[in-house]
Image (cartoon, helix red, strand yellow):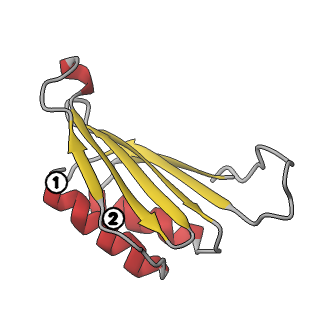
Amino acid sequence: MNRVALTTIAPEIYRKRLLVEGYFRSEVTHDALLAYFARITGELGLRTYGEPIIHRTSGEGKAANEGYDGFVPLIDSGIYIAAWINPRFLSTVIYTCADFDEDRAVEVVRDFFRLREHQAAIF
């Protein structure tokens, strides 16, 4: 996993960002993304303060970009996911001002979506 800091600005503000991207084998639906947010926040002990918001492109753009966008607000920031249905690719970012186990987070994403290939970066 890449662990290179991207910036040195505002070192007094603790923040942690984890990006996981990969090709998924599981079925991605609105309900699956709700379950993902419940699993990732539960496994990492991250507290939410609102319900997840999930949108489907529903044919509004190019077929290659058909998929979902989702976000769940955390007390300490938020988690975002984008899933492209046709190439079966996803990108998720966990952004917090609290610490979490990044190795466990990658495992949860990998296992939940049954990723056949993935990369992760903490920054």
Along the viewing direction, whichever of 109 and 54 lies nearer the viewer: 54
Task: Give percent across and percent down for residue 20.
Answer: 48, 50
Q: Which residue is mark 2?
A: 111
Task: Give percent across and percent down for residue 116.
Answer: 33, 48
What whole-number distance in Å separates the C-alpha atoms at marks 1 and 2? 18 Å
Give neighbour class at mark 2: few <14, some 14-19, many 20+ (Cα, 10 Å): few
Quick check: 105 left or right of 52?
right
Task: Give percent across and percent down for residue 90.
Answer: 35, 43
The residue depicted at 48 percent of the width and 82 percent of the height is 45
Along the viewing direction, whichever of 78 and 110 lies nearer the viewer: 78
Residue 77 position by quadrant: bottom right
Give neighbour class at mark 1: few <14, some 14-19, many 20+ (Cα, 10 Å): some
Mark 2 residue type: Asp
The residue depicted at 40 percent of the width and 44 percent of the height is 22
Residue at the outermost front position = 50
Q: In the rendered picture of this protein, how many numbered marks are placed on residues?
A: 2
Task: Give percent across and percent down for residue 17.
Answer: 61, 56
Residue at the outermost top position = 62
Residue 107 position by quadrant: bottom left
Instruction: Name the secondary structure under disc 1.
Output: helix
Q: Which residue is mark 1?
A: 30
Instruction: Name the secondary structure under disc 2.
Output: helix
Sequence order check: which comes first, mark 1 or mark 2? 1
The residue depicted at 76 percent of the width and 49 percent of the height is 4
Q: Residue 122 bears which disc, if any?
A: none
Indicate which label's residue lies in the foreground, 1 or 2: 1
